[in-house]
Image: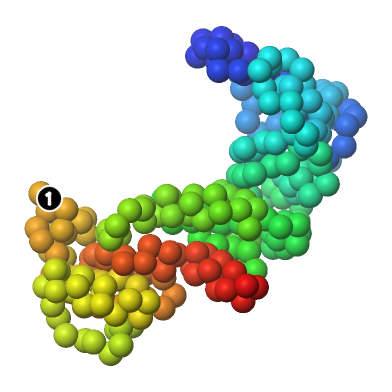
């Protein structure tokens, strides 16, 4: 509450709720640290050996919190079902229960981001990802440059291993999810640039090295056979072709199977087809084509 007052959150429609978040309304014991002004590791899922003090707290569901917000903040849309644009979870091991509750809650959640910790969760990430996918959500591992798809068919057991990681999910059939993936990767506009990346495979077996302008023209002429062009780059940050960096080139036209990949030699890629840069966007395009 102190931070809310100091930062003026109340002017933005802030409502503080003194309760824990769970999948059932009720009460539970919370293990917490008395030395912390803001305890970010307090948990309902404490171990019997946990020596921290306990406090009985209210437990609310997402629907409870949404109803409280609708009652307390005038002007919020009262449409049914209520909608949540973005839900952010960092609730020390209770994430699986709350995430599964999204599949049956009255409130419709568009996007959700949550923290995963293999040392705190009592079940593996793959089971939760599979349940969310069965309920219509598609999830990604958040990295600085990309949103890496982890829902089927992209799941790998390695994603269970990180001590800490953050994930982002949205409705698989929501066009806005594709837009978020593109925005996060920076593939927006005409011929967007992807520094330090390359595209696999030469388009229609055209392996000739061309000027930047020549490669773009050939790629345009090849149409769907060419996803973009990959160019040599003498700039350390891979931003050739964008002043004041040096020009990009020589360049080759690429088919781009598997999306844009990290370049060990600092190449730069320009996408004719922005959707071809991301695995999820390719997957969604082919899925839509199959169902058409």
Q: In this view, does 96 lie to the left or right of 279?
A: right
Who's the residue at 75% across and 62% down the image? 134
Q: Where is residue 4 in the image (x, y as percent from the top left)?
A: 57, 14
Q: Is residue 55 left or right of residue 87?
A: right
Q: Position of residue 51 (x, y in %)?
A: 77, 32
Who's the residue at 27% across and 64% down the image? 270
Q: Can residue 3 be seen in this view?
A: no
Q: Is residue 82 above or below residue 15?
A: below
Who's the residue at 74% across and 26% down the image? 78
Q: Is residue 186 above or below residue 15?
A: below
Q: Is residue 57 above or below residue 273?
A: above
Which of the image's four quarters has the C terminus?
A: bottom right
Q: Where is residue 190 in the image (x, y as percent from the top left)?
A: 29, 57
Which of the image's four quarters has the N terminus?
A: top right
Q: Which of 275 and 40 is in front in this view?
A: 275
Q: Is residue 85 left or right of residue 265?
A: right
Q: Nearer the viewer, residue 98 or 273?
A: 273
**What SS does tag 1 mark?**
loop
User: Residue pushed farthest bottom?
Assistant: 205
Q: Is residue 80 visible?
A: yes
Q: Mark 1 points at which residue?
A: 243
Who's the residue at 71% across and 57% down the image? 136
């Amino acid at each position: 509450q102190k931070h809310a007052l100091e930062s003026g959150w109340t002017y933005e429609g802030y409502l503080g709720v003194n309760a824990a978040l769970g999948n059932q309304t009720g009460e539970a014991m919370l293990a917490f640290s008395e030395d912390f002004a803001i305890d970010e590791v307090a948990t309902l899922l404490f171990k019997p050996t946990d020596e921290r003090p306990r406090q009985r707290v209210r437990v609310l569901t997402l629907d409870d919190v949404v109803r409280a917000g609708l009652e307390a903040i005038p002007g919020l849309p009262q449409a049914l079902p209520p909608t949540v644009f973005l839900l952010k979870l960092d609730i020390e091991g209770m994430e699986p229960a709350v995430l599964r509750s999204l599949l049956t809650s009255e409130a419709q959640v568009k996007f959700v981001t949550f923290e995963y910790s293999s040392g705190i969760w009592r079940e593996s990430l793959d089971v939760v990802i599979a349940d969310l996918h069965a309920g219509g959500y598609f999830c990604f591992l958040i990295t600085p440059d990309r949103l890496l798809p982890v829902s089927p068919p992209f799941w790998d057991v390695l994603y269970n291993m990180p001590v800490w990681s953050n994930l982002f999910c949205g409705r698989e059939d929501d066009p806005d999810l594709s837009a978020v993936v593109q925005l996060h990767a920076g593939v927006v506009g005409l011929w967007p640039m992807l520094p330090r990346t390359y595209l696999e495979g030469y388009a229609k077996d055209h392996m000739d090295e061309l000027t930047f302008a020549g490669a773009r023209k050939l790629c345009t002429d090849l149409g769907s056979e060419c996803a973009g062009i990959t160019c040599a780059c003498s700039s350390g940050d891979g931003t050739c072709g964008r002043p004041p960096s040096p020009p990009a080139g020589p360049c080759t036209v690429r088919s781009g199977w598997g999306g844009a990949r990290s370049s060990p030699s600092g190449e730069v890629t320009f996408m004719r087809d922005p959707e071809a840069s991301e695995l999820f966007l390719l997957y969604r395009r082919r899925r839509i084509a199959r169902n058409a």
